[in-house]
Amino acid sequence: MKKDSSRSIHDDMRTEYDFRGAVRGKHYKPLHEGYSVRIRQPDGTSEVKRYVLAEGAVLLQPDVREYFPDSESVNCALRSLVALMSEMPREAFGRKKGHGAKHRTSAQGRSKAGRA
């Protein structure tokens, strides 16, 4: 059966909703840049609070968040991935020599420095 092209998916939309001239993503701003919240007080004044993600914070997309609901599950999965990566040749995943040097923990860095 041929679809009726005169009918659109917006036919179920109420008539009072008018999106002509609307701009998709007009108010979108990446969270890593921070955001402001205006708090209106009962006395008529308002206070603006600025929030920025803490250093080292990582945002998970909703589809990933389904599988990793907390920090512990994310860290466990990433540690498993790091273990697998260390068993593979560096060329297999495009990592160049010396790339991981700056990511060592301070204890690892001290032990290397102490031997040099």
Image (cartoon, rainbow, N blue to C red):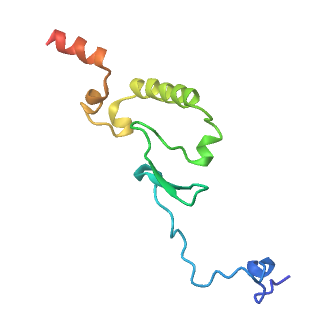
Task: Give the farthest residue toward the right.
Answer: 1
Q: Quadrant of the C terminus?
A: top left
User: Does residue 48 appear left or right of residue 3 in this picture?
Assistant: left
Q: Residue at x 23, y 14 (%)?
A: 110
Task: Give the farthest residue toward the front.
Answer: 43
Q: Quadrant of the N terminus?
A: bottom right
User: Does residue 55 appear left or right of residue 106 in this picture?
Assistant: right
Q: Residue at x 64, y 37 (%)?
A: 67
Depth check: 75 or 3 in front?
Answer: 75
Q: Is residue 114 above or below residue 14?
A: above
Depth check: 92 or 107 in front?
Answer: 107
Q: How many marks?
A: 0
Residue 96 appears at what percent x and percent y? Answer: 27, 36
Q: Is residue 11 above or below residue 53?
A: below
Q: Residue at x 75, y 77 (%)?
A: 9
Q: Quadrant of residue 44?
A: bottom right
Task: Give the farthest residue toward the bottom.
Answer: 6
Q: Quadrant of residue 70?
A: top right
User: Does residue 78 appear left or right of residue 7 in this picture?
Assistant: left
User: Does residue 18 appear left or right of residue 57 in this picture?
Assistant: right
Q: Is residue 94 above or below residue 36?
A: above
Residue 33 appears at what percent x and percent y? Answer: 40, 52
Depth check: 13 or 41 in front?
Answer: 41
Q: Is residue 76 above or below residue 38?
A: above
Residue 45 appears at what percent x and percent y? Answer: 52, 58
